[in-house]
């Protein structure tokens, strides 16, 4: 069995945790044998697959499988074209000697903190709104690997700070626009084939 979930922010991508809610808390008890394929950070939203088939994990997660994961991000700061070029070439990730693999990266648009008021972290809202004209970059990043916090670290390496992040596709499988945050549904065989496609 494979489920597609539209993961909301605020949940851990884990089977269980002693003190924090997880994505499995959205499922009925009879589905608690499923596990998430890969991870999305607690504050990251979007497409998440859950399964009871352990063979799917390496097929979808290993870089050599070349299954692309597409993310939309908003970041504080104005990232110019050279920043996206650097991410396409691969950047050194903070806190390690590891360089990311080349990725597809492109600009969506520029906006301001004021225009993103409803999306700002609540604990930083008052501080950030002191400068509502501060620039925000909206962009896309498509990866073939999945290191911890990778999108955030790649954007940070080129001068931005991600504050919203959503995964929209795995392979050629797109997040079902009919799924509200927290909703899920079974994946068909054809859709699973799309997820595994390069």
Image (cartoon, helix red, strand yellow):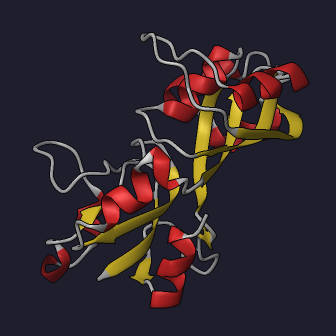
Task: Relative to 172, say whether 62 is above or below.
Answer: above
x and y, in percent, of residue 107 in the image:
85, 38
Q: 45 or 103: nearer the eye?
A: 103
Would residue 188 be visible to someone looking at this image? no
x and y, in percent, of residue 40 in the image:
42, 47
Tally of marks: 0
Q: Residue at x 43, y 10 (%)?
A: 95
Task: Relative to 176, say whether 160 is above or below.
Answer: above
**Left or right: residue 17 compared with residue 135:** left
**Left or right: residue 15 compared with residue 85:** left
**Left or right: residue 112 compared with residue 186:** right
Occupied quadrant, residue 197 = bottom right
Quadrant showing the C terminus = bottom right
Q: Which residue is drawn at 43% across and 34% down?
A: 147
Q: Residue at x 87, y 35 (%)?
A: 111
x and y, in percent, of residue 22 in the image:
26, 54
Would residue 67 be visible to someone looking at this image? yes
Q: 55 or 120: nearer the eye?
A: 55
**Left or right: residue 46 compared with residue 189:** right
Among all residues in the image, which is located at the extreme left?
A: 18
Occupied quadrant, residue 55 = bottom left
Q: Which residue is drawn at 82% across and 40% down?
A: 106
Occupied quadrant, residue 28 = bottom left
x and y, in percent, of residue 1 in the image:
29, 83
């Amino acid at each position: 069995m494979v489920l597609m979930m539209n993961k909301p922010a605020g949940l851990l991508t884990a089977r269980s945790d002693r003190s924090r809610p997880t994505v499995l808390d959205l499922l009925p008890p009879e589905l608690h044998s499923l596990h998430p394929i890969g991870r999305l950070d607690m504050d990251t939203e979007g497409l998440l697959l859950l399964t009871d088939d352990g063979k799917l994990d390496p097929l979808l997660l290993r870089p050599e499988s070349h299954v692309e994961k597409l993310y939309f991000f908003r970041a504080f700061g104005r990232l110019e074209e050279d920043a996206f070029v650097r991410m396409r070439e691969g950047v050194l990730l903070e806190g390690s000697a590891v360089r990311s693999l080349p990725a597809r990266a492109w600009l969506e648009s520029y906006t301001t903190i004021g225009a993103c008021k409803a999306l700002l972290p609540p604990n930083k809202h008052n501080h950030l709104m002191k400068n509502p004209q501060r620039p925000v970059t909206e962009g896309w990043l498509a990866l073939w690997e999945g290191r911890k916090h990778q999108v955030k670290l790649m954007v940070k390496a080129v001068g931005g700070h991600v504050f919203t992040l959503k995964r929209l596709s795995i392979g050629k499988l797109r997040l079902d626009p009919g799924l509200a945050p927290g909703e899920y549904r079974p994946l068909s065989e054809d859709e699973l084939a799309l997820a595994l496609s390069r």
